Amino acid sequence: MTLSTAEAGVREAALEDGVVSAVLAGGRRVELHQLALRDLCPCPECRHPVSGQRLFESARVLSDTRANAVAVSDEGTLLLEWEDGHRSIFTPDVLAEVTHARPAAPKPVVWSAPLGRTPPRHDWEAVATDAFALRAWLRDAAALGFTLLSGVPVDPGSVAEVAQRFGAVRETNYGRVFDVRVDVGATNLADTALPLSPHTDNPYRRPTPTLQLLHCLASEVGGGETVLVDGFAVVERLRRDSPDRLALLARTSIRYAYRDADAELATDVSVVTLDADGSPVALHLNNRSKGVPVGTPELVADWYDAYLALLALVDDPVQQVAFRLEPGDLVLFDNERILHGRTGFSSAGARHLQGCYADRDGLLSTLAVLER
């Protein structure tokens, strides 16, 4: 039954067979089941006023829930009365958000080599003291998957202070902060002067650290340029060129492993992770710690065909951004999206980076608060 209309907001509403249909300002019609609306009731009895968390147990309330009547207030809100006497009031904004939810994070903006001419760069002094500068830095990081900072003090441990501007440092077996420099007898290839192919870190760890920060303290050697690749852009190219190969990489897990005197880490994960719509959400790609697929010879042959096709796209200069980190520069990147590597360098002179890991949820949380 349609009970009333409003000049703005919800214009009309009806209840039939447990489904509420409403016409919003602008003529858009939405339909919601009564159970969803009861579960989403925003009143103070049902939701915490600060966190918005639900204060009742869905299993106890929804099993006997029935809507008695629906109406539209003079202010354009949707009113629902329930058989148990409870009353719910929904604003048009709440209804619009329920039926067309805002994304939890900025939509990824994929990129290729031309971005290298104007990579996103921000000033640490501004980011450290100004909320608007901090928001711009975090928004670039969320959308593009990486950003550069200039002017970070070349003091040991500064990289952790930068991470704490938006969240917490993720400590691993490498420590809270780790050093990347030439080290005689190094067990990790990152501590040699050899080039590193584009990769993601810690694919052998569950959960994988989702953000990495690298801060340059010294750079006196020739070479050693940082190389970044947008893994999401590469996945989209593979999807266009060979969707069957992408599907195989997404559904086949391989073992990633790392060991040293103090750690024994391993997990099984696919090289590419896709969401329900087929969009990329994560890559785990690390030649140094990669195992091999397990299955029939035919499956293994097909997997390597797909894997090598992916690597060919990663190695395509069209996909790569390369730049030199100078003392005081810091690069932040999404470790499940952006593949990072470096060119080889001469061991004469000093090259010293410090890094730390953090998590994407802290960055996105801080960004969401700043954008309220």
Image (cartoon, rainbow, N blue to C red):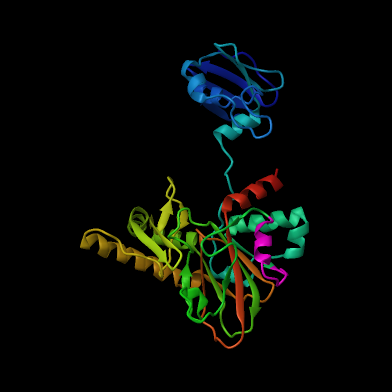
Q: Residue at x 42, y 53 (%)?
A: 273
Q: Residue at x 43, y 64 (%)?
A: 285
Q: Nearer the viewer, residue 341 or 90?
A: 341
User: In terms of image quadrants, where is residue 178?
Assistant: bottom right
User: In the displayed image of the protein, which residue is found farthest to the bottom?
Assistant: 348
Q: Nearer the viewer, residue 360 or 114?
A: 360
Q: Tell me the quarter of the image containing the C terminus.
A: top right
Q: Position of residue 213 (x, y in %)?
A: 60, 64
- From the viewer's perspective, tell me whether residue 355 is left or right of residue 206: right
Q: Nearer the viewer, residue 166 or 239?
A: 166
User: In terms of image quadrants, where is residue 180?
Assistant: bottom right
Q: Position of residue 261 (x, y in %)?
A: 44, 68
Q: Position of residue 102 (x, y in %)?
A: 59, 41
- From the viewer's perspective, tell me whether residue 84 is left or right of residue 289: right
Whether residue 304 is situated above or below residue 68 in the rendered picture: below
User: In the displayed image of the protein, which residue is found farthest to the left?
Assistant: 297
Q: Residue at x 35, y 68 (%)?
A: 308
Q: Tell me the quarter of the image containing the N terminus.
A: top right
User: In terms of image quadrants, where is residue 181?
Assistant: bottom right
Q: Nearer the viewer, residue 216 or 183?
A: 183
Whether residue 40 is situated above or below residue 196 in the rendered picture: above
Q: Residue at x 35, y 60 (%)?
A: 255
- From the viewer's perspective, tell me whether residue 181 is left or right of residue 263: right
162 part of magenta stretch: yes
Q: Position of residue 174 (x, y in %)?
A: 53, 65
Q: Is residue 371 visible?
A: no
Q: Which residues are magenta?
A: 150-165
